Image (cartoon, rainbow, N blue to C red):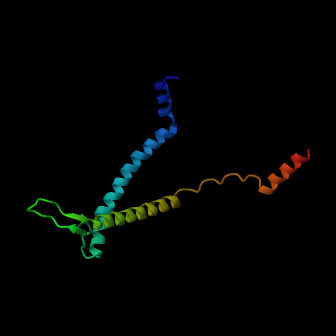
Amino acid sequence: MSMGSEFKDFIARGNVVDLAVGVVIGGAFGAIVTKFVEQMIMPVVGLLTGGVNLDGMKIVLKAADEAAKTPEVAIGYGIVLGAIITFLIIAWVVFLMVKAINKVRPPAPAAPAGPTAEELLAEIRDLLKK
């Protein structure tokens, strides 16, 4: 089998196509949720926190020296806090959406019940007796 036909078989598998569709839809969904959080939720969070700008929060380790043209050295913990808050809000929104979708979606049919452990052991015992 040539590499070209192997690649064709690989790409033609349903799960590869499903994965590609999932990645594209996931990227688009992520963009929607991110914009929702940035434009709808974070302004409310900013209002509740008194307009605190998390991006400006930092610990300056060494101030910038304009004479020596050296930049400031700082730990920007505010950006990390903002990213954590954004992540938690996005996770909460996704959780609520999944919960709503699960309420609308009919329950999956139950898998047929198999034999119990006792029934399997009894069957093994009977086979060993023969």
Residue extending farthest top: 2
58 or 96: which is nearer to us? 58
Q: Residue at horizontal 8%, vertical 62%?
A: 67
Where does residue 80 sit, x and y in percent of width and height?
32, 64
| Left or right: 90, with 3 as reference point | left
84 or 103: which is nearer to us? 84
Quarter of the image where the C terminus is located: top right
Where does residue 113 sit, x and y in percent of width and height?
72, 53
Q: Residue at horizontal 50%, vertical 28%?
A: 6
Q: Residue at horizontal 31%, vertical 58%?
A: 35
Where does residue 1 sit, x and y in percent of width and height?
53, 23
Q: Is residue 119 above or below residue 23?
A: below
| Left or right: 31, with 98 as reference point | left
Q: Is residue 124 above or below residue 72?
A: above
| Left or right: 49, with 88 as reference point | left
Q: Residue at horizontal 25%, vertical 76%?
A: 50
Residue extending farthest front: 68
Q: Quadrant of residue 86?
A: bottom left
Q: Quadrant of residue 97?
A: bottom left
